[in-house]
Image (cartoon, rainbow, N blue to C red):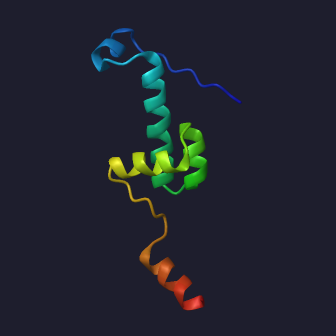
Amino acid sequence: MTAVQVLFPSDVFAALRQSPEEVSRDMRVASAIRWYAQGRVSQGKAAELAGLSRAEFIDEVSSVGVTVCQETLEEIDAELQRA
């Protein structure tokens, strides 16, 4: 596994009222949600990147207003037509 280091001024953690570990978790979840919303990663891969179960990831995605379904209505309709 490759590690990525992000440096923050130490007062950021006090301002956020979070520990470095909590900020790290939030950043992982936010990144995974963003990449999932952009269609760059699957739901399963995003959950893995976030360090969450798939169900937990779906809850996080829903809580920030991102749609859980990556398919468009047109794609779903086309799939139904093929079935």
**Above or below: residue 69 compared with residue 21:** below
Residue 41 seen:
no
Query: Residue 78 location, x and y as percent?
Result: 52, 85
Residue that protrudes farthest toward the right in the picture: 1
Q: How many marks?
A: 0
Q: Is residue 12 above or below residue 56?
A: above
Left-right relation of 66 to 1: left
Picture coordinates of residue 64, whole percent (x, y): 33, 47
Identity of the residue drawn at 45% across and 54% down: 37
Residue shown at 39% from the left, 11% from the top: 9
- Of the 4 image quadrants, the one containing the C terminus is bottom right
Q: Nearer the viewer, residue 4 or 33?
A: 33
Q: Residue furthest top?
A: 10
Residue 2 image point, x, y percent: 69, 28
Task: Tell me the residue at 43%/31% (across/down).
Answer: 26
Along the line of sight, which residue is nearer the eye, 47 or 9?
A: 47
Quarter of the image with the N terminus in it: top right
Q: Is residue 61 visible?
A: yes
Please determine whether, in this image, residue 54 is positioned above or below residue 78: above
